[in-house]
Amino acid sequence: HSYVLGVVPHSWKTALVHPIPKKGDRSDPSNYRPIAITSLHSKTMKSIINRQLMGYQEEHQLISDHQYGFRNGRSAGDLLALLTHRWAQAIESRGEALGVSLDIAKAFDRVWHKALLSKLLSYWLSERLCRWIGSFLAEQRVKVIVDGSCS
């Protein structure tokens, strides 16, 4: 029903966050790992949507063959094996091998939602799917729970 209407219930967009202490000074907020608990309905729907999007990207070759992160059947080990092979080839031919690795901190937290939705529509994804994703991204809520008290 949520998908057909393109509207995600507020309860699906609310995460209960439990801060779990790491090692170090407990008065430093960066020494806590946030564990977010979300609705079972939300998790199920996100899994279905993710599978749909990943299948679409693979089918329409929208992801570079050199992309290893967040892809089924690929791992960091596969990438390491490929790079080791390429570097060995470069050494044997007395050539050069250069590598660039990007790991953008909190990259998903910085995505501009309006541009993302526009991009999804430009790839001919259904308006219904894009409307549902837009609704899901809008008005996300977090409640922090510490010692049984909720923010």
Image (cartoon, rainbow, N blue to C red):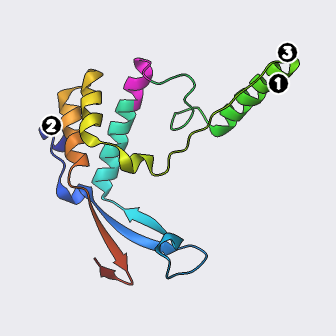
Q: Residue at label 2? A: 4
Q: Residue at label 3? A: 93
Please state the extent of the stretch shown in magenta in the rendering: 54-62
| Residue 119 lies in the magenta stretch | no
Q: Is residue 137 left or right of residue 81?
A: left
Q: Main secondary structure of the magenta part?
A: helix
- Where residue 62 sits in the image (x, y, percent)? 42, 21
Q: Residues within 10 Å of mark 2 (few under 14, many from 20)?
A: few
Task: Identify the disc placed on residue 63.
Answer: none
Looking at the image, is mark 1 or mark 3 earlier in the sequence?
1
Q: Who's the residue at 23% across and 38% down the image? A: 114
Q: CA distance from mark 2 to mark 3?
A: 58 Å
Determine the image quadrant of residue 141. Answer: bottom left
Q: Who's the residue at 19% across and 45% down the image? A: 135
Q: Residues within 10 Å of mark 1 (few under 14, many from 20)?
A: some
In the image, residue 140 above or below residue 27: above
Q: Residue at label 1? A: 88
Q: Residues within 10 Å of mark 3 (few under 14, many from 20)?
A: few
| Residue 57 lies in the magenta stretch | yes
Q: Are marks 2 and 3 in contact (CB under 8 Å)?
A: no
Q: Are marks 1 and 3 in contact (CB under 8 Å)?
A: no
Give the label, 1 or 2, closer to the camera: 1
Q: What is the three-letter code of the residue carrying label 1? A: Ala
Describe the element under mark 3 as helix, strand or loop: loop
- Where residue 151 sits in the image (x, y, percent)? 28, 76
Q: CA distance from mark 1 to mark 3?
A: 9 Å
In the image, residue 53 above or below residue 16: above
Q: What is the three-letter code of the residue carrying label 3? A: Ser
Q: Is residue 71 left or right of residue 18?
A: right
